Amino acid sequence: MGQERANRGEVIITGLGGAGVLTAGTLLAEAAVERYKNVTWFPSYAISKRGGFTECSVVFSDGEIASPLLSQAEGVIVAEAAQFEDFERRVRPGGTMVVEKAGLQAKKTKKDITVVEVPAIEMAISSSGTSQGANLILLGAFLEVTGILSLELIERQIEKAFAGKEKALESNLKAIGEGRNLIRNFRG
């Protein structure tokens, strides 16, 4: 997946609680609207209660999108390491999975995917004293690894979503940048 070269993108984002997963998915979908003709965003709650597992699917395409539901996607972001095994099989061959490193015990079994472990919670706590923002660190890392959408499109959406909320705007822009920089620094 090169920098915005695909005519279609598919991303599943999953985690606990929901707000961070849905925020990352919404930002991704809204950014894709600026680049693609058709975009879907579909949230799903595993157990209909607050704090349970949540996922959202984002599909963007220049062509028609038959369904917002994805059994597999070219990109998967896993914000809760305990979900690694369940979501590894949902990454299409040749796809990429970005996963939270904290608590990750499972090892990759699929040979035909790329798995990138990101210490997003640790980075968020180190940066702000709280784990809030870990979702955007993961999203920033995912965008840098895959190039599926430009980070600038996401940054514009963050600026729109948090306009007038300077502290939130600053911390969210910082988080997305930290994810990108982690990958850039790793690549050397």
Image (spheres, rainbow, N blue to C red):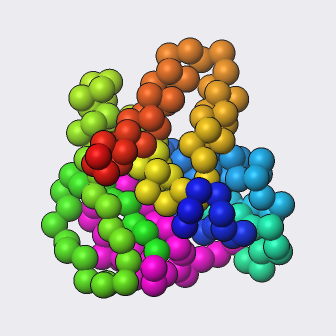
State the residue in front, 69 or 127.
Answer: 127
| Residue farthest along the front direction in this orientation | 188
Is any atom of residue 3 visible in this view?
A: yes
Where on the picture, by quarter, is residue 98? Answer: bottom left
State the residue in front, 85 or 158.
Answer: 158
Q: Residue at x 60, y 47 (%)?
A: 150
In the image, 19: left or right of 113? right
In the image, 78: left or right of 28? left
| Residue farthest along the left direction in this orientation | 105
Where on the picture, by quarter, is residue 111? Answer: bottom left
The magenta region covers: 68-94
- Quarter that holds the N terminus: bottom right
Q: Residue at x 27, y 65 (%)?
A: 82
The question of residue 88 being in magenta is answered with yes
Q: Residue at x 69, y 46 (%)?
A: 31
How many marks the image carries: the answer is: 0
Is any atom of residue 17 visible in this view?
A: no
Residue 142 image point, x, y percent? 45, 55
Q: Residue at x 50, y 68 (%)?
A: 75
In the image, 53: left or right of 27? left
Relative vertical location of residue 52 with respect to residue 72 in this rendering, above or below? above
Residue 128 image point, x, y percent? 32, 24
Residue 80 image point, x, y percent? 33, 57
Where on the picture, by quarter, is residue 16? Answer: bottom left
The question of residue 74 being in magenta is answered with yes
Relative vertical location of residue 109 with respect to residue 95 in this rendering, above or below? below
